[in-house]
């Protein structure tokens, strides 16, 4: 959720660096999320048919991180940078969809209730941390690049944490 809320709340301001009108920013933001929604549904359908939820969760987080870094690397070309941001948003949305299929595989009964509440509490903190980091780093650096790279770092960490669940997958 650090990546999801971080990009979700600041995407219009990031797009504003491309000197778009408010209406254009709205359409481009909507376009990014439309592509991400289609990607999320297609990816979740593929995972339902083929399995490997944990590996795909890790891959989705890594894809989002690559998207954030790509958007910085290609920042001199605004529209290519927007394509990479769309990749990042697609990865984040796919990860959110895949994530909630995994805890029930490890938790049941009373543990499921407590475990899901704990997960939601940690996620809520991520919803605070993501935008705060982007805003803080933008104020101190004058741009969004360092914040986007930081979100990418969080997503790489999430990918590694998800990958670590592979050892429990066969059980």
Image (cartoon, grey):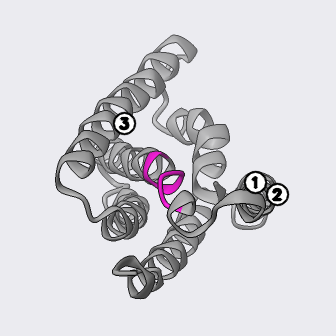
Question: Is residue 100 inside the magenta stretch?
Answer: yes
Q: CA distance from mark 1 to mark 3?
A: 23 Å
Residue at horizontal 46%, vertical 82%? Answer: 160
| Magenta residues (range) | 97-102
Residue under label 2: 121
Residue under label 1: 120
**Pick the front one: 96 or 101:** 101
On the question of residue 138 being in view, the answer is no
Q: Position of residue 112 (x, y in %)?
A: 70, 59
Residue under label 3: 36
Q: Residue furthest front?
A: 109
Residue at horizontal 39%, vertical 63%? Answer: 57
Tag shown at residue 70 = none
Residue at horizontal 31%, vertical 31%? Answer: 35
Element at badge 3? helix
In the figure, is residue 117 to the left or right of 100?
right
Q: Is residue 169 above or below residue 69?
A: below
Element at badge 2? helix
Q: Is residue 85 above or below residue 161?
A: above
Q: Residues within 10 Å of mark 2 (few under 14, many from 20)?
A: few
**Marks 3, 2: nearer the viewer:** 2
Whether the residues at callouts 2 and 1 have beta carbons within 8 Å, the answer is yes
On the question of residue 145 being in view, the answer is yes
Q: Earlier in the sequence, mark 1 or mark 3?
A: 3
**Pick the front one: 21 or 82:** 82
Question: Is residue 156 inside the magenta stretch?
Answer: no
Q: Is residue 91 above or below residue 168?
A: above
């Amino acid at each position: 959720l650090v990546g999801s809320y971080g990009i979700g709340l600041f995407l219009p301001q990031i797009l504003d660096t491309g000197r778009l009108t408010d209406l254009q920013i709205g359409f481009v933001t909507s376009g990014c999320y439309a592509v991400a929604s289609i990607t999320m549904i297609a990816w979740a359908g593929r995972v339902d048919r083929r399995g490997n939820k944990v590996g795909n969760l890790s891959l989705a987080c890594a894809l989002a991180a690559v998207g954030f870094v790509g958007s910085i690397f290609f920042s001199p070309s605004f529209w290519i940078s927007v394509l990479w941001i769309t990749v990042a948003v697609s990865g984040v949305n796919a990860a959110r969809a895949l994530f909630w299929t995994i805890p029930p595989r490890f938790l049941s009964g009373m543990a499921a209730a407590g475990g899901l509440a704990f997960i939601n509490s940690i996620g809520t903190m991520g919803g605070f941390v993501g935008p705060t980091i982007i805003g803080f780093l933008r104020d101190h650096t004058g741009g969004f690049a360092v914040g986007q790279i930081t979100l990418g770092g969080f997503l790489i960490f999430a990918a590694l944490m998800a990958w670590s669940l592979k050892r429990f997958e066969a059980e």
